[in-house]
Image (spheres, rainbow, N blue to C red):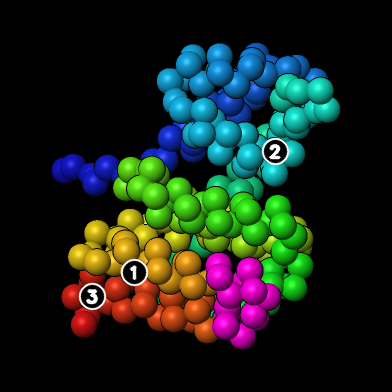
Amino acid sequence: MFKKIEYRRLYEDVITQIENIILAGQLAPGDKLPPERELAEEIGVSRGTLREAFRILERQGIIETRPGGGRYVRKLPENRLDRERILSNLETAAMLDLLEAREALESKIIELACERATKADLEAIERALSIIEEGKAERYEVLDHDQAFHLAIAEATHNIVFVTICELYLDLLFKIRAKTTVMPGRAKQILEEHRAIFEAIKCRDANGAKKALMDHLRNIRTSIKKAEGKE
């Protein structure tokens, strides 16, 4: 009779609200959005959550930040349904199949990140990592920053295709993490694995970074099996 309630991240609701306002014609291309502080208070979210929503909307080309300050509507969210369709198709894949695909995809991402990461890229990766390590986020916010960590690595490749693919499977990764991070000691272990990946990227050690990544994915696989009672 009842359905399980799925957790939704706050920034997803912010994105949906902004997109719906644009689609309803209340904001049109060229219109300026309210100041960040004002909008955060009106919606009832933190400025960090709002910035995460803006970051995704900017990547989709729906809004833009112009020189001199201010964010503006750039275009209508016409690709939203296509994105939802792709995500829906991806959700039919088993978690373990996704991990197998990640082994191939993220190995190349790691390799390119080691080669191409700028100082700003490294700072972005470490910033996502540090927020979790310093205990500044609640459990689900930790999962958001976990996603930010992997996305920051993809962005360090400076290859928009890798970034886009990574974004598409982030929602599926969230479901995996939500299922496995509750296991005793796993959250701390994930931090250690992420730190090892980052340190190798910072040292431009592609082989070391790949090994750290494979260790991370292998441990995720083990955790999933344990969570499902298969080990």
Q: Is residue 205 magenta?
A: yes
Locate residue 164, reporting x and y percent.
67, 57
- Magenta stretch: residue 114 in it? no
For this orientation, the residue located farthest to the right is: 67
Q: Position of residue 215 (x, y in %)?
A: 44, 81
Residue 191 sits in quarter:
bottom left
Q: Earlier in the sequence, mark 2 or mark 1?
A: 2
Q: Amino acid at mark 3?
A: Lys
The segment highlighted magenta reads 198-210
Q: Is residue 80 above or below residue 20?
A: below
**Label 2 crowding class (10 Å Cα cut-off): few <14, some 14-19, many 20+?**
some
User: As displayed, is residue 152 above or below residue 201?
Assistant: above
Q: In percent of the image, x 52 and y 28: which residue is there? A: 47
Q: Earlier in the sequence, mark 3 or mark 1?
A: 1
Residue 58 is labelled as 2
Q: Secondary structure at mark 3?
A: helix
Q: Earlier in the sequence, mark 2 or mark 3?
A: 2
Which label number is shown at residue 189?
A: 1
Circle 3 sits on which residue? 226
Query: Which element is circle 1 on?
Result: helix
| Residue at 72% in and 25% down | 71
